[in-house]
Amino acid sequence: MAIHVTTNDQKTTFCIETKNALYQMQADGYGVLKHLWYGAKTDCDMSYLLDYPDVGFSGNIYEAENQRTYSLDTLPLEYAGAGIGDYRISAIDVVHADGSKALDLRYKNYEIRKGKYAITGLPAVYATEDEAETLRIVLKDTATGIEVILLYGVLADLDLITRCAEIRNIGETPAILTKAASLCLDIPHGDWEWVHFYGRHTMERQIERLPLLHGIQESSSVRGTSSHQQNPTVLLCKPDCTETMGECIGAAFVYSGSFQTQIECDQLGQIRLVMGIHPELFRWTLYPGEVFTTPEVMLSYSNTGLETLSHQFHKIIREHVCRGKYQLAERPILINNWEATYFDFNTEKILHIAQEASRLGVDMLVLDDGWFGKRDGDVSGLGDWFVNEDKLVGGLGNLVEKIKAMGLQFGIWFEPEMVSEDSNLYRSHPDWAIRIPGRNPNRSRFQLLLDMTNPDVIDYLYQVMSDILSSADISYVKWDMNRSICDWYTATLSPERQGEMPHRYMLGLYDLLDRLTNAFPDVLFEGCSGGGGRFDAGMLYYCPQIWCSDDTDAYERTKIQYGTSFFYPISTVGSHVSIVPNHQTGRITPIESRAVTAMAGSFGYELDLNVLTHGEKEEVKKQIAQFKAYGSLIHNGKYYRLTNPMTDKEAIWSFVSKDASEVLVQGMLFHTEPNMVRHMVCLRGLSPKKKYQLSGTEMVYTGAALMNGGILLPKAWGDYTPVSMYLTEIV
């Protein structure tokens, strides 16, 4: 078993052992659940490390009497309540019926179950009974009827522990949760740095690594989505941690709404990490007998560097978060018409694009925004999910059949959560839009949001989307979401419960996604929020790939995809070749470089193939053939970051098969330097004694040579030189 519990008269010690890590906590004689250790296996009770002085102005629990070294303000706690003398950031805040806010949680009991817990209405890691165990630890407030059940899902072979909390009101009066974090992790010892992934629209998941300051540092979103600006993931690293050595801890929130990650370095240099729903947009009334369950956090540890940690998260997300037909399947190579036509298209234009796409070997055409309602620009039509037959003469079914006759599958774009004021839906149901009575609503992209807490809205969207998906042979849905959320108010909740709306919005969204993905299991759903504004594990539970960014510039994409790769597997990354000059930056890059960058994901095109030269079209044929040849290796192999494009002169990565018999090295040399030796990069993940031949040459190398001496990259010629090198084992 992965979970071991030892008990004596004074304490109960919980040990969670995964393949390479130990997670340990202890309920002491006062019932305080202390966190002891998360790190390498030690085969030891780690409580010996907790040796504290009498720290001035850090008070003591009543039961400890004059034992002044025992303080909740200094001890590492497993789930920290507010208002009881621990002045660090809390994991949970409750307002009781009498107006008080203290929550003093003490150990009550525990239970171990086979299999992994599930969370009703929320995405979560899943596993069979043979793959996982669940530990339930019950804590109870000393003075009220509030219980907190800490849930630990353990996938030992994958070095994964998941965390969430059930908060129960077993008392006789209501209580109000004002904060309910999913993870509280105290690290008593060590020097740590933190890594977060910041950005903006068209520049998501830029990586920043910083020493921890004394005090509180935070990455968060109050935008109603996980956001372009911060990602709901975090790394803690020892200062000497690199890709291939050193200790690091990763945490990823399985949630797509507003979140908060706070890290506090306290007065003693100890670290507390708290992650969960952002409390600024959270207030939940818990009546007697009711339960609130937080979303979960995935937690993993490595003492062999960031590369190992990434591989652990990649495997977890691919095999235990993503679901359905396309969970592990290779994805169709698609052409999206957006940058080719924007809103200005008709049946003839789309068929013209499809015809050339078919000739060049593309698998699917995706019809983007503008096919429905009165939608000739971005100021009208959202919510009217019926076909505009002025554009698509003969209807959607006619178009799809003609595209299918060319040998192509068909996909379509929706933005279900949005409504335009100039729409039949809004004119019929203005009350379905989110707005505060007496205030003008905030517009973004000149659109409003539908109230996803309203069951009538969910039922409407399910029906109209089902009607479209049933009306023709549709194989793919791009699910877009093009604004942040504010003006939080819903007529579905009483005034005192309005603070529940942001989380209930997410529950409504997840309900709709669950209904549609179950009703249409053969449809590939791709998430999108202006590109990567909702790129998180919560969405990946329903959509096995997400459009990585609206920035299709190949150079910028190397940085965006680099940051994305620390937690998210390559198969989840939507990435396409677009036209030059690029529509976001104006940069001109070779079509070969654009393709190499887009191949580090689910490959496709975002342009009008008809405007390419004959030479470019021949190159497209080669690219498609290459991706089909390498697709399994790219999606199923291990991914290695061989350089850092944020600081280095090149962006180079590789994919290595599970048996280390083949490796694909790809990337880009940013700028040509005259009179300079060729760039070199050391590979990783190969078998030292195997021999590898470079495709298209007679060159043969040992794995040891490639990993220690490296391989010479192509000679740069012009800026943004592509790199694509395939090596296979020879016997």
Image (spheres, rainbow, N blue to C red):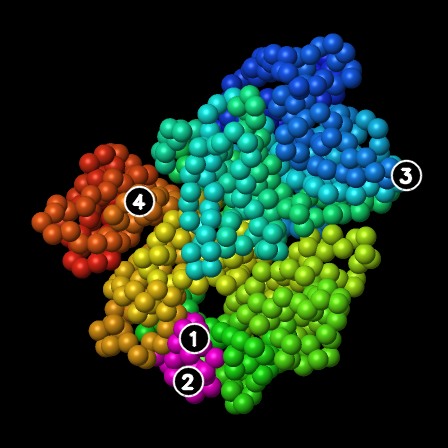
At label 3, the amino acid type is Glu
Q: Residues within 10 Å of mark 1 (few under 14, many from 20)?
A: many
Q: Tell which circle, 1 or 3, labels the residue nearer the N-terminal end.
A: 3
| Residue at the disc numbered 4 | 647
Percent position of residue 701, x then y? 18, 41
Percent position of residue 237, x then y? 45, 32
Between marks 2 and 4 in the image, the one whose residue lies nearer the viewer? 4
Give me the C-alpha separation between circle 1 and circle 3.
59 Å
Percent position of residue 29, x then y? 73, 15
| Residue at the disc numbered 1 | 337
* The label number, if any, that marks residue 172 in the structure image: 3
Left or right position of 2 against 202? right
At label 1, the amino acid type is Asn
As helix, strand or loop, the secondary structure at mark 1 comes to: loop
> Can residue 584 be seen in the rendering of this structure?
yes
Between marks 4 and 3 in the image, the one whose residue lies nearer the viewer? 4
Query: Residue at (27%, 66%) from the top-left corner?
Result: 588
**The one of 44 and 558 positioned closer to us in this rendering:** 558
Give me the C-alpha separation between circle 2 and circle 1.
10 Å
Q: Tell which circle, 3 or 2, labels the residue nearer the N-terminal end.
A: 3
| Residue at the disc numbered 2 | 349
Residue 511, by quadrant, is bottom right
The stretch drawn in magenta includes residue 347: yes
